[in-house]
Image (tube, coloured by chain):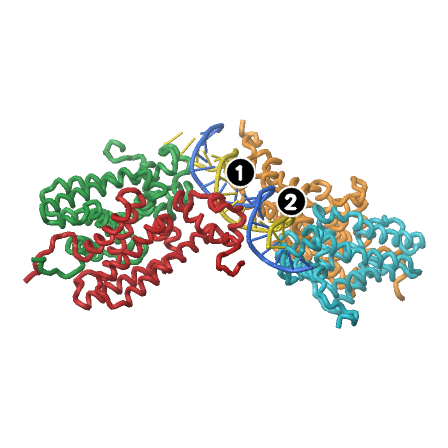
Chain colours: A orange, B cyan, C green, D red, E yellow, F blue
Amino acid sequence: MSSTGAKAVPDRRRAILDAAVRVFARQGFHACRVSDIADEAGVAYGLLYHYFPSKEEVLNTLFLERWGVMLQMIREVDAEQIPVREKLGAIASFIIDSYRHDPDMMKVIIVEVTRAANSFGQTHLGQIREAYRMIGTIVTKAQREGVFKPDIDAEFAAMTFYGAIEQVLTGWIFGLLPQGDEAFERAKQMVVETVCGGLEVARAPAA
Amino acid sequence: MSSTGAKAVPDRRRAILDAAVRVFARQGFHACRVSDIADEAGVAYGLLYHYFPSKEEVLNTLFLERWGVMLQMIREVDAEQIPVREKLGAIASFIIDSYRHDPDMMKVIIVEVTRAANSFGQTHLGQIREAYRMIGTIVTKAQREGVFKPDIDAEFAAMTFYGAIEQVLTGWIFGLLPQGDEAFERAKQMVVETVCGGLEVARAPAA
Amino acid sequence: MSSTGAKAVPDRRRAILDAAVRVFARQGFHACRVSDIADEAGVAYGLLYHYFPSKEEVLNTLFLERWGVMLQMIREVDAEQIPVREKLGAIASFIIDSYRHDPDMMKVIIVEVTRAANSFGQTHLGQIREAYRMIGTIVTKAQREGVFKPDIDAEFAAMTFYGAIEQVLTGWIFGLLPQGDEAFERAKQMVVETVCGGLEVARAPAA
Amino acid sequence: MSSTGAKAVPDRRRAILDAAVRVFARQGFHACRVSDIADEAGVAYGLLYHYFPSKEEVLNTLFLERWGVMLQMIREVDAEQIPVREKLGAIASFIIDSYRHDPDMMKVIIVEVTRAANSFGQTHLGQIREAYRMIGTIVTKAQREGVFKPDIDAEFAAMTFYGAIEQVLTGWIFGLLPQGDEAFERAKQMVVETVCGGLEVARAPAA
DNA sequence: CATGAATGAGACTTCATTCAT
DNA sequence: TATGAATGAAGTCTCATTCAT
């Protein structure tokens, strides 16, 4: 019966999006052909144009879909009444878990969008900026509470924090850093510890 | 007279490389045409093929030229007998000054190479890895000396440090962070302070 | 009730034909899509293929439907016992009234068929030629009767007459000539007066 | 020596234009491929894009080149101090001789431009209108001089005259009217005689 | 009847690269 | 050296038509 809730008809649009993630991750947006995506999805390439106006829009759709979830997550984290370490930890965890769950998707988002200053990065600059802005807000609050040093610009700290995470993901993407469940968990802790506590051993505060 | 030592003949090869930097920075490697580079250099596009076997090789040349200087710089810094903060500070200064001196070149290197996991990033993975490795060595030494915490993986710390810098440059490239001489100097200090000292206010070490 | 004689069910085939006229007129046969016609008709585009084997056949149907009426009209006019001026006047009136009543249809017939020498004009050459032939017959009769000059080829005169009318319609289609009830009536008179009486003021016949 | 005046290098741009005329005439603009034109010209299809930005621009170039000559001719004819019959005769002669000399070119201009209300006809409406306008001016002058009847709108008469000629050309293009040197000469006379003197035998003017 | 998802032939256009001059 | 005409592989996108539902 169709009332079971399971879709009787295959969702080709979803299949195309999922295939696009794999193909973009493997070959890159520019190096792949529309027919590569279609082949990966097991459909005729014309069908892609039934659901999307262009190859670009496939990537835009993927990005917005995923980035929206992250923005929502940051928004919720920011609203919680928890220490700043936990907030930044939650963000790092979300991003790293996103990579663990779907490394191809994160690779595509980072490589093809957030770091592509001349193409999709420009297209989605507003969305990207929003993430930085919200992290900056978290830092600012921590500075007001006296938990974070006031002499480091909040927006700068936000870029540093987010940049550190993205670079770790880049390390995994390039195969330069070890991966695995343990590595992912350690990474969550280390990135927060580094940015919050610093690499240096704790010293007595200036008297 | 040409005997003054100055080159009387224009260095077309150099002109092409310099033009390529500007064009790659403005349009991106994929979006620009060989003729765009030639136009910018004021030469016929066929001439590019006298000096380089392909468009790709122009970018490869630019990257290797510049990246080699940075590797040499890190190598020298690492060899010096100075505190780790100064070493990392010297690296951060070099990169940021490189951006100050030639933002187009740094944009090209970052956007088209070090973050392009599916194209030139793969081509130059060895060179890129070498930079991370050397920074990791600096961290490892600091850990052996008891200056840096031993419980954060050195290679991880290296990625974090370099990632923070690159993200700040990305912020400038995207126009998300303020630029200017003062901003550049502050950035040098802040990135080192953040990664070494942490964002948190200093606390007394665990007794 | 459906027993009233009026069709209770909508005539989809007719709706598609009527929509096609509007769409062909607006966008041209080549520039429009089958789905444009379907949208205009308010049906799914697949339905078009229930009633017509192809997009081309929709235009063929429209043309033959309308052109057949015109041929029949010319045939009847020719059979009447009236002066040649009245015959040509009746033909001009019919064509101009056709335009007045349904300018889109006439635009499609003229632009897409009677003047499309490389596509539908070839397909329907026989039908088109038949119209010229019948007009030519009318001219020939008038020449035999001594009303029309014998030294102008009848088939040539037929082309001239029909061409003049079609050009006037083209003027309306292009927006180059004023339209309106008065303009249409004047056009009927002027085209007949021009072709029959000439543009020159009447002179005494050569003695 | 290259000083003989003969071009040593083949003019590929011209070859492409000439080939395009033949291909457009044979297959129609829409039905032909860019590669058909290139094949006809004996060049690689990429070369077409070296000289023209698009297939459309090839047709635009052909039209403007030829139509400009015609406008210039009409302009000169209009300026002469000769009877209106001679003026219209000169115009008819020019157009018919153009067809005799290069029937493909005239076919393209008529079929693809001056009668293509939904495509190139719109693009070049201004140019087309200019021709009608100048002919209309000639008619107006003849009316002022008392040679042409004042009760037929000049712009209307212009459309009729030009339409008659174009229809005769269309007859040749469709193969509906006989061609040949004699036919062309007769056509020149007949079209002027028809439009100026009318098809009817001359009668005494109304007393 | 009616729908619109699915197909894929086909066309335009781009542009890196070659090479005759 | 220097030029830019010439080449053609390659890729995106369109859209008429089919057909399962």
Q: Nearer the viewer, mark 2 or mark 1?
A: 2
Q: Is residue B131 visible?
A: yes
User: Is the residue C51 above or below the residue D124 in the image?
Assistant: above
Q: Position of residue D152 (x, y in %)?
A: 19, 60
Which quarter of the image is occupied by the N terminus of chain C? Answer: top left
| Residue beneath the point at 20% across and 39% down | C72
C41 vs A23, left or right, is left
Front residue of A74 and A125: A125
The answer to whether tags 2 and 1 share a subunit is yes
Q: Outermost residue, top direction?
A: A1
Query: Does dot 2 land on a helix, a strand or a loop?
Result: loop
Residue carrying label 1: A47
| Residue beneath the point at 47% across and 50% down | D16
Query: Total marks drawn?
Result: 2
Front residue of D94 and C70: D94
What number is the disc on residue A31? 2
Q: For mark 2, name the chain.
A: A
